[in-house]
Amino acid sequence: DKVICEAGYSDGSTAVDYDVEMYDYDDNLIAKEKTDKRSIAEFTHPETDFYLVFDAGHESPVEVDIVELKEK
């Protein structure tokens, strides 16, 4: 299974070539991926619960917990 994260800004613009980080609930970094030209970062779904962090540097970082994710 994969976790697919679409990153972007509050004005609707894309976030290309930015880091998205995946952490477990003990705040250990599990994985880090860069967004592609579509603003997408793909991760292998871990065995543990996790949350994602997108920090573009000029706004507050965005954290998304596994319970907030939608399955497709």
Image (spheres, rainbow, N blue to C red):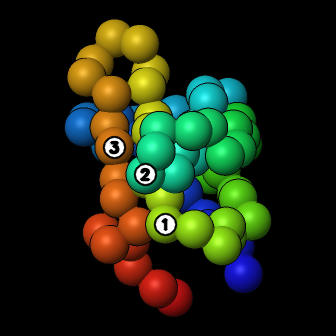
N-terminal of the pair, mark 1 or mark 2, is 2
Give the Cα separation between the discs numbered 3 and 2.
12 Å
Q: In front: 23, or 63?
A: 23
Q: Tell me, yes or no, if residue 58 can be seen here.
A: yes
N-terminal of the pair, mark 1 or mark 3, is 1
The residue tagged with tag 1: helix, strand or loop? loop
Find residue 58 and report its horizontal and vertical position in percent. Answer: 34, 11
N-terminal of the pair, mark 3 or mark 2, is 2
Residue furthest front as drawn: 26
Q: Which residue, given by chain and number where applicable, does mark 2 sit on?
A: 25
Find residue 44 and report its horizontal and vertical position in percent. Answer: 75, 65
- Using a 10 Å C-alpha cutoff, classify the residue at mark 3 as few (fewer than 14 neighbours), some (14 to 19) or many (20 or more): some
Residue furthest top as drawn: 58
Q: Which residue, given by chain and number where applicable, does mark 3 sit on?
A: 63
Q: Which residue, given by chain and number where applicable, does mark 1 sit on?
A: 49
Nearer the camera: disc 1 or disc 3: 1
Nearer the camera: disc 3 or disc 2: 2
